[in-house]
Amino acid sequence: MTFLARENNTMKVDVTLQGRRHTVELTHAGERPQWKIDGCEVEADALEISHGAYSVIVDGGSFEVQVEESSTGLRVVADGYEYSAAIENPRERKKNRAGAAEAQGRQNILAPMAGKIVRTLVQAGDQVQAGQGLVIVEAMKMQNEVRSPKSGTVERLGVVEGQTINPGDVVAVVA
């Protein structure tokens, strides 16, 4: 998932959980990452134990959390309870408020960074909407979603799962 806005060594996302928006910040300073939720520091750590399954520790409590995509965002199951969630990149919200236009014409979607393709979300011939995820790139132990800049048809997928990519490599073509 690519939902991170970076400011120095801080990553920030807005998370809507059960209809309520929260700001989550992760700062890498020193040996341990520092977490803030809605401006309040919390002791937290998370480790992906398998695809979509995480071991999460928050303020000394340990939880196994399952996360999967749903038609309305994310479905999160933690400690036997199910939650609906959505993650929003603050940069995207600012861009959308500014009335950014959808890209026109045939678009080569380029890799924004070096990394490894961990998941392809579409196939050649699929119809996509502007902003829809195409592939997930893992870089520096973070997963980032590369999205389509326009609505259209995936003409060609230029990568496969497990492939290593460099910045500027064509990951997909949308027409």
Image (cartoon, grey):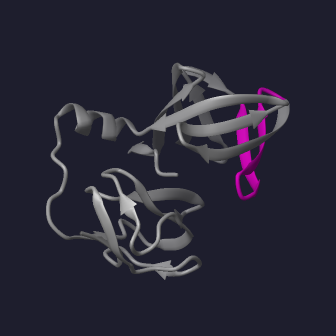
> How many callouts does the rendering have?
0
The quarter of the picture where residue 7 lies is top left
Residue shown at 65%/38% (left/top)? 75
Q: Is residue 81 above or below residue 134?
A: above
Residue 53 among magenta residues: yes
Q: Is residue 120 above or below residue 32?
A: below
| Residue 105 image point, x, y percent | 14, 66
Camera-side residue: 109 or 132? Answer: 132
Residue 139 among magenta residues: no
Q: Is residue 12 above or below residue 6?
A: above
Question: Is the C terminus in the top left, top right, bottom left or bottom right quadrant?
Answer: bottom left
Q: Which residues are magenta?
A: 43-60
The quarter of the picture where residue 108 lies is bottom left
Task: Please tell me whether the stretch drawn in magenta is mainly helix, strand or loop.
Answer: strand
- Apparent side of residue 12 relative to residue 36 in the rendered image (left or right): left
- Apparent side of residue 22 relative to residue 113 in the rendered image (left or right): right
Residue shown at 41%/66% (left/top)? 126
Residue shown at 45%/78% (left/top)? 165
Camera-side residue: 34 or 113? Answer: 113
| Residue 9 image point, x, y percent | 46, 45
Residue shown at 58%/32% (left/top)? 85
| Residue 160 image point, x, y percent | 52, 80
